[in-house]
Image (cartoon, rainbow, N blue to C red):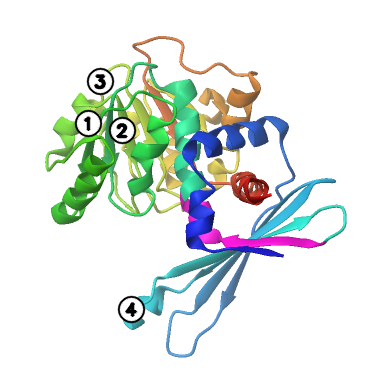
Amino acid sequence: MKTFDTLATRNALGFDHLVPALAQMFTGGCEVPARHVHSLPLEGGSGVTVLIMPAWQAGRYFGIKTVMIAPDNSQQGLPGLHSTYLLYDARTGVPLAQMDGNEITSRRTAAASALAASYLARRASRHLLIVGAGRVASLLAEAYRSVLPIEKVTVWGRKLPTAAQLAADLHVCGFEAAPCTDLAEAVAQADIVSCATLSNEPLVCGEWLREGTHLDLIGSFTPAMREADDACFRGASIYVDTDEAWHKSGELLGPMSRGVFAASDVRGTLAQLCGGSRAGRTSAVERTLFKSVGTALEDLAAAVLVYESAA
């Protein structure tokens, strides 16, 4: 069994290869059962949550990601989330590789947003606004640049020094990058607005968005989380990564419960976009919106890319 540490996993997942790998997996499909969620009680603490996420292609590969979420780790100076990925031969059950699950998760998440934008954003999009300055946010500019001519990047974060540091890092990578403090003004100027936060309250208001903008919402993966207000959905062409998004994200559940839009209003999923059964953007003035919650299909695509790149 091969072992891919953090650096080796990262190096194998360049976005110029990862985005096409996701597109191929969404087109071909794989089996993705519901994730397992378990709680490990901890005396005197909040305990540990365990997520087990399998996916497989019959006769090819079987993969499983295990995620350990320990909120109390911050008291010990440790990250609150750790994950690993195991890849097997689906024909024989032979273990093939163990990989850094954190790298797989963060990079496939950014790649999925870029893949969606390749269908939904205007082809001439050059100005990206990143809302958030965490791990996934730090990867978005590079991911988007693999599919669109992104030159200018504006970064907004709750803490200006953190946003400024990300902008400085992106400047080194060849972007015209700068932090901002006025989110409304930044939204109004951007071609693409990509949100990767853990916010429970809307950050982006629909009245700030100009026609033709593509809005990418990554952060809301529980019913309590929101990054965009209801107005962002009114009049927008809405797409999701998978049908599972309906059951998880407050970004969708909230507006739907208030009659802002219905499930039938959603234009399609990533699988439908990649497979060609649903159209993407149809005009330069159309306002598009993509909501993702993540899927084990993306993890499997990334893990297979890591393994086959080494082979």
Residue at which label 1 appears: 187
As shown in the figure, which amino acid type bears the numbered disc 2?
Answer: Val
Label of residue 77 in the image: 4
Image side of residue 128 versus residue 302, left or right = left
**Element type where label 3 sits in the image:** loop
Label 4, label 1: how many angstroms apart (C-alpha)? 35 Å
Tell me whether the residue at label 2 lies in contact with that at label 3, contact meaning CB atoms closer than 8 angstroms: no
| Residue at point 20%, 26% (across, down) | 188
Q: Is residue 293 visible?
A: no
Using a 10 Å C-alpha cutoff, classify the residue at mark 2 as few (fewer than 14 neighbours), some (14 to 19) or many (20 or more): many
Residue at which label 3 appears: 210
Label 2, label 1: how many angstroms apart (C-alpha)? 7 Å
Sequence-wise, which precedes: disc 4 or disc 1? 4
Most foreground residue, 294 or 22: 22
Sequence-wise, which precedes: disc 4 or disc 3? 4
Most foreground residue, 20 or 33: 20
The stretch of residues the image draws in magenta is 94-106
Using a 10 Å C-alpha cutoff, classify the residue at mark 3 as few (fewer than 14 neighbours), some (14 to 19) or many (20 or more): some
Label 1, label 3: how many angstroms apart (C-alpha)? 8 Å
Outermost residue, left side:
181
Sequence-wise, which precedes: disc 2 or disc 1? 1
| Residue at point 80%, 46% (across, down) | 60
Tell me whether the residue at label 2 lies in contact with that at label 1, contact meaning CB atoms closer than 8 angstroms: yes
Residue 53 in the image, given as x and y percentages of width and height: 64, 58
As shown in the figure, which amino acid type bears the numbered disc 4?
Answer: Gly
As shown in the figure, which amino acid type bears the numbered disc 3?
Answer: Arg
Q: Quadrant of residue 205?
A: top left
Label 4, label 2: how many angstroms apart (C-alpha)? 32 Å
Q: Is residue 37 visible?
A: yes
